[in-house]
Image: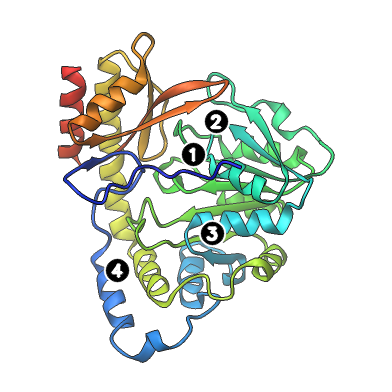
Amino acid sequence: MAGYVPGEQPQGGTWIKLNTNENPYAPSPAVARAIAAAASDRTLAKYPDPLATVFRLRAADILGVDPDWIICGNGSDDLLTILVRTFVGSGDRLRMPYPSYILYRTLTEIQAAHADEVHFQPDWSLDDSFASPEKNLTLAIIANPNSPSGTLLSPDRVKALAERLPCPLVVDEAYGDFAETNCLDLVRQSENIIVMRSLSKSYALAGLRFGFAVAQPHIIQQLRKVKDSYNCDTLSIAAATAAIDDQAWLKTNRAVIIATRQRLAAAVRGFGFQVAESQANFVWCTHPNRPHKPIYEALKRQGILIRFMDYAGWGDGLRITVGTDQEIDACVHCLKTL
C-alpha cells in the first residue's frame, strides 16, 4: 500500500506556511496557563484520565449533549482510526466521496477492506448514488466541509443520505467551526450519524493533537473498546479543556479567519482562478489555462508553501490555507508577479 503523505513540514528556514490548514494565530492564552498548571506538580508521573472526563464535561455543556455522548482522541486522525477499526473488517467496504481526505483510503487499506469511492459532481455535490446499498458496506465517511474543496453539504442533505445508507455515517467536521452550519443536531436524531471535531484548526492546537467525536452513548461504548487505553495525554486534556472553554476567543478568531478567507478568494479570482465556495480555513483554486504545479513550485522558491494536489480521474489544483493578513498579502503579491 501507499502510505499517507502529510503536507510539507519544513524544519529549517523561514517559510510562509499556507499548505496544511493550520491556524496562523496563537491559541487562547488560557491554554498555556493550563499546560503550566498541569506540569507544575507530580501529575505527569501518573497515567492520564483514559476518558478525558474534564474535557467531556466542559464540551458537553457547550455542545448541549451528555458527556457520555463524547469520545476523545489524539487528534481526529486517531478517532478515524478507531472508527474504521470498529466498523470495517477485512473484505468490508468503506464508502467515501472523491476527491476528499486521502487518509480515509489509507485506513481502509490497513484493514484489508475496499475503498468505495463515489465521485463528487462538478459542483461538489453528492448525488444519491453515495447512499446506494452495497454488499458488505459497513461504514461511510463524509468530510464536511470537504477537503480539498472547502465546500459544504447542508444538514438536510447529510440526513437524507444517512437515512438511505445501510451503515453508520461519519461526518468529519474538522473544519466545521468555520462553516455556516453543522450536523451536530443530527446525532440526536439518528444513531447512525457520528460527528467528529478537531481542535487543530479552529482552536489553533495542531501541535497538541486533540479531537473528539459525538455519537449516541451505545455507539460510544463500542468505540471505547477499540481505542488505546490512554490515547490523550495529561497536557493535551488540560489544554483542550482550556481551549474549548474560551468560546470568546473562538468567536473572534473565526471572524478574522473568515474575513481573510473572503479577501483571499476575491484576490485569486482576480488572477483568473476558479475558486470553490469555501466554508473552511482554506480555498481550492483551479486555473483554466495555467498549469498548477509550476505555480506551486514558483511560490515555494520564494519561501511560500501552498498545497499542490493531483487526483487521478478528477484533476489537480492548488489549496491555499488562510494565513494572517500579512501572509496572504505576500502570497497574493507573488501570485501577481507570476
Is 134 situated left or right of 259 in this image?
A: right
Find residue 44 and report its image quarter.
bottom left
Residue shown at 26% from the left, 29% from the top: 264
Mark 1 vs 4, N-terminal side: 4
What amino acid is labelled 2 in the image? Pro
Mark 1 vs 2, N-terminal side: 2
Relative image position of residue 135 (x, y in whole percent) = 84, 39
Q: Residues within 10 Å of mark 4 (few under 14, many from 20)?
A: many
Mark 4, residue position = 31
Is 276 situated left or right of 154 in this image?
A: left
Q: Quadrant of the C terminus?
A: top left
Mark 1, residue position = 145
Mark 3 vs 2, N-terminal side: 3
Label 4 close to label 2 by CB (< 8 Å): no
Q: Residues within 10 Å of mark 1 (few under 14, many from 20)?
A: many
Is 191 situated left or right of 48 in this image?
A: right
Label 3 close to label 2 by CB (< 8 Å): no
Q: Is 337 rendered above or below residue 265?
A: above
Label 4 close to label 3 by CB (< 8 Å): no
Alpha-carbon span between mark 1 and mark 4 = 26 Å
Mark 4 vs 2, N-terminal side: 4
Relative image position of residue 10 (x, y in whole percent) = 28, 47
Alpha-carbon span between mark 3 and mark 2 = 21 Å
Alpha-carbon span between mark 4 and mark 2 = 35 Å
Q: Quadrant of the N terminus?
A: top right
Mark 2, residue position = 99
Q: Nearer the viewer, mark 3 or mark 1?
A: 3
Q: Nearer the viewer, mark 4 or mark 2?
A: 2
Q: Nearer the viewer, mark 1 or mark 2?
A: 2
Mark 3, residue position = 78
Mark 3 secondary-structure assignment: helix
Alpha-carbon span between mark 1 and mark 2 = 13 Å
